[in-house]
Amino acid sequence: MDISHILDQLNEPQRQAVTSESNSVLVIAGAGSGKTRVLVHRIVWAVQMLGISPYSILAVTFTNKAAGEMRSRIEEKLSIPVKGMWVGTFHGIAHRLLRAHYQQAGLPRTFQLIDSDDQLRIVKRLMRDNQIDESRWPAKTFQWYINGKKDEGLRSKNLEAYNDKNEQQNIRVYALYEAVCEQNSLLDFAELLLRAHELFLQNPDLLRIYQHRFRHILVDEFQDTNSIQYAWLRLLVGERNQFFVVGDDDQSIYGWRGAKVENIQRLQVEYPGIELIRLEQNYRSTGNILRAANGLIENNADRLGKNLWTAGEEGDPIKFYRAYNERDEARFVVERIGAWVAEGNLRQDFAVLYRSNAQSRVLEEALLMENIPYRIYGGMRFFDRAEIKDALAYLRLMSNNFDDYAFERIVNTPPRGIGDKTVSVIRANALQENISYWSAMEIIIEAQAIPSRALKALSAFQQLVSSLTELVEQPLHEILENTITQSGLLEYFQKEKGEKGKSRVENLQELVSAAKQFEELDETDLAEDPEFEDLDTLSVFLAYCALESGDSQNDPHGDNVQLMTLHSAKGLEFPSVAIVGMEEGLFPGHQSINEPGRLAEERRLCYVGMTRAEQQLFITCAEHRRLYGRESYPQVSRFIREIPNDVMVEVRPSSAITQPVSVTPARPDTSSSTGFNVGQMVKHDKFGEGILVAHEGSGHHARVQVNFNQVGTKWLVLSYANLTII
DNA sequence: CGCGTCGTGGTTTTT
DNA sequence: CCACGACGCG
């Protein structure tokens, strides 16, 4: 068989990585260096050239999107569907293992998954039940604590508070939370990983089976692994399996949620023979962009070291703009987008990246003003939407009457006259008798223990759920359709006025079609394996919904400018990129400035942002920013100064003047031929008095920006405005 | 039960 | 500044 085509499209280090026969390989893959390509080709190589069975391959990624992309690219290359190969996320694979071996994992067959929203609800309710003051200890901090410990592989019983009052409380809540989850057979995301790890630890025979099966283990984005994921991988790799890891220490930006870059270093210690391969040739960005990014990231200590280069062009220098304020900054970006489009480019090829979501607002306003369509990434995901979770809660309750959290969510959603009073009676009864809410409800109805009005409403609810439960044999989408209509959810949201109600109705309808798609998709992770055969469709679908938060939002719908945080830009690329808000305190954020570790992560985030750009990169900051209603005069971000001088120029509004960025940033020339200077107090006939904060252009078109005491900031054309200096 | 007011707090996000 | 959650009223 001619397999040369597998290697033809690869450069030397890529080829080396694909064909390496070392037992463990660590590929340090810089941004845009063809990381996914290497993973895909290695698998294809193994199957086609080495005759390795797909059955013995396990490929792990972090996101469903990455897993899906890898799978489809492999199948495309092999031109046959790959049976038996496991490609998935850590969570998806852990889930699959737990479903297949639920007894050994100490779980009931029908265990359910919960997302972080459900998790928070549980913590909140548990706090109420145990008289823990939510205003003193916000539920979120406990949630954070619990997940953090689970990511470290620690259960409450492994923790010791000593004399720390705070820690005692943390551990107490953690233990209570564990008990609740145990009782309701609920597993949160971190629990999946922890359980999967324990499953192997406590069942050596089972571990051996899987070690024997997965002779080839590949991991993507290794710098994002947390402690428990790494521990789980180590078990599976064992003494002799092939371990192929791809990552980039410079792109580790998730330390704050438990990812350990150190795992890359550990790898080299714990797998002494590991072959280190660097992919440094970049196929994405211009030479200038790469030099800027390289220069920046060199300021980080403890790097494995890597220098991106390109065989392509130098390209334009990076354009740095110091705006007078955040609105001027937005105006500048919009202007560049205008120019980009005027040159015949697509809006969707221009991305604006910011550190925090709050920054999108000014940009949106500016884009709206110019009628430029845009799209914001991130935010609510499909399966996180309230209306979707409501509908799914009905399914949960149908699938498992003992799911108190589903019960609580929908007992009065849509409103059907079951108030707090009634619910607290149910809750009290359930707590006292140690039974589920559902059973408590049945007893209360039986005993007619509540006022007749409430009783009537409650029996109607009971009958509703019971009659829905009878539909369980029907096709999934019909169950859903019946659920949203008979429950009254659809009607309820139809009555809700405005865009909101409309989109909720649409989402519910989309859920029905998602269910339809799910039925057709028999090659789902779960359905593929015989272990799941005895599980009802409903449970499988619910698990799917929990694990697949629905990044269908990611498909670009129409030609829109793309707005997103730097974090969500990871893994993406755009011909033209603007990074805004490059100011000390914002980026790097004030929380990070005095902690070297966190500062380094901010710098990596900046590196990630810069390396998204293919041709053009703009970086902006504002000298004056209104944030949270407060005024601030931030310093230019240190990251700006870390970018080498010769690859970046500072640009001024509406003028052709460009100059190298001065190392000690000086205020741009504030005087002009117009006779007005920034900082002067001026008076306008209509708007009253204000301070001049910016000016641009000259002659007849000269404009100034004035911050008026009464009406806020405005741009005025000098020749019309009739301003007087006061 | 739904709507209004007051008060508070406010990186980053996937599974 | 503004969004969201906790309360109180009709």
Image: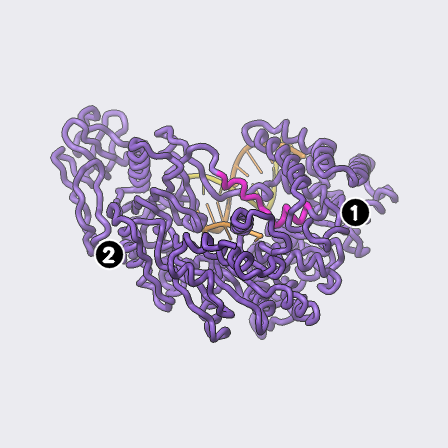
Chain colours: A purple, B orange, C yellow
Residue range highlighted in magenta: A541-555
User: Tag 1, which chain?
Assistant: A
Q: In this view, does A162 lie above or below A408?
A: below
Asked whether residue A437 is drawn in magenta, I would say no
Residue wearing tag 1: A438
Asked whether residue A554 is drawn in magenta, I would say yes
Mark 1 element type: helix
Q: Is residue A482 visible?
A: yes
The structure residue drawn at horizontal position 37% and vertical position 68%, both measured from the top left corner, is: A302
Q: Which mark is residue A644?
A: 2
Q: What residue type is labelled 2?
A: Pro
Q: Which amino acid does label 1 sit on?
A: Trp
Quarter holding residue A422? top right
Quarter holding residue A35? bottom left
Q: Position of residue A12 (x, y in %)?
A: 38, 60
- Left or right of residue A107: residue A149: left
Q: Which mark is residue A724?
A: none
**Residue toward you, A141 or A96:** A96
